[in-house]
Amino acid sequence: METLVENRDNKTVDSLAVVMPVYNEGERIYDNLLEASRIVGRFAADYEIIAVNDGSTDNSLDEIRRAMKADDHIRVVYYDKNHGKGYAVKLGMTTSSKKLTAFCDSDLELTPKMLKSYARALSQSGADIVIGSKMHKNSRIEYPFIRKVMSYGYYMFLKLLFRMSLKDTQTGIKLYKTECIKEVLQHVETEGFSFDIEVLAFAHSLGYRIIEMPVVLSFSRKAGNRSKIKISSIFNMISDTLKIRKRVREFAKTER
């Protein structure tokens, strides 16, 4: 079990990479990356912020590079064609050289300061993965009612398919032991929003321990800049999830 020791600089996490996927976030990604770095720097002794530019068509890449000049803890992974959140997070995580690797949405509606308590929980519990959960009894959430309905509906769908005890697989903040996530990612194929459930389903099949932690969420997107999840994305998630179930079952059979 990894031990967290607070040093004289009040840094409780030895080594952490935070992966932040970026798609057309040019208006705010510069400020968000610098803010993420400031937050993580308060509790991590050795850290990096990995911005993955997922084929943005705006000025996101230029703004990421501007942030890199302002803070050498920030680096970029990029490519020309948009592939989706899962592809971006997976690619970013495979480049991590730190002991712990986290994923955090680049809009910062879920602040990376939560990763400090997640790292503590990871160490104290002996778990391999900590995931933020909107359904945790101690979560403080403020987001649209329709999103709450969608989240609960997807939770019930996943519980039926995978029989895992996890209540919320889709919240955009998670922390992994790097050696764990790199093994799991070898089996993950999903590139879109269903990436999270495939990671957790394979992690469960591989025997890794997953725990849930509360989140503080304030939904900040304005009416003209709502969440990127659309009706078509929902149908794609359902289709992808059914494919994931098949792959996980086939994997489990080969492991017996």
Image: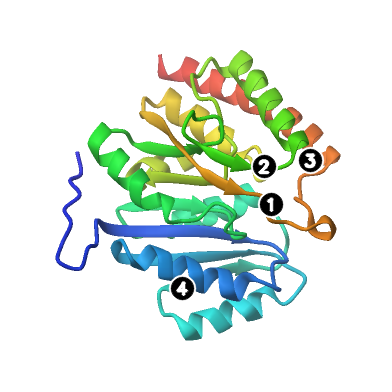
| Amino acid at pointer 4 | Ile
Which of labels 4 and 1 is toward the front? Answer: 4
Q: How far from the left and from the top, in percent, is residue 78?
A: 60, 68
Q: How far from the left and from the top, in percent, is residue 37?
A: 44, 69
Label 3 close to label 2 by CB (< 8 Å): yes
| Amino acid at pointer 1 | Gly
Q: Residue at x 17, y 46 (%)?
A: 3
Residue indicated by mark 4: 74
Residue indicated by mark 2: 193
State the image quarter where residue 22 is shown.
bottom right
Q: Earlier in the sequence, mark 2 or mark 4?
A: 4
Q: Earlier in the sequence, mark 2 or mark 1?
A: 1
Q: Earlier in the sequence, mark 3 or mark 1?
A: 1
Lateral position of residue 219 relative to residue 114, left or right: right
Q: Earlier in the sequence, mark 4 or mark 3?
A: 4
Indicate which disc residue 132 carries.
none
Does any portion of residue 189 appear in the rendered image? no
Q: Residue at x 69, y 33 (%)?
A: 148
Q: Residue at x 70, y 73 (%)?
A: 26
Residue indicated by mark 3: 233
Label 3 close to label 1 by CB (< 8 Å): no
Residue indicated by mark 1: 84
Question: From mark 3 to mark 1, how far is it between C-alphas?
Answer: 11 Å
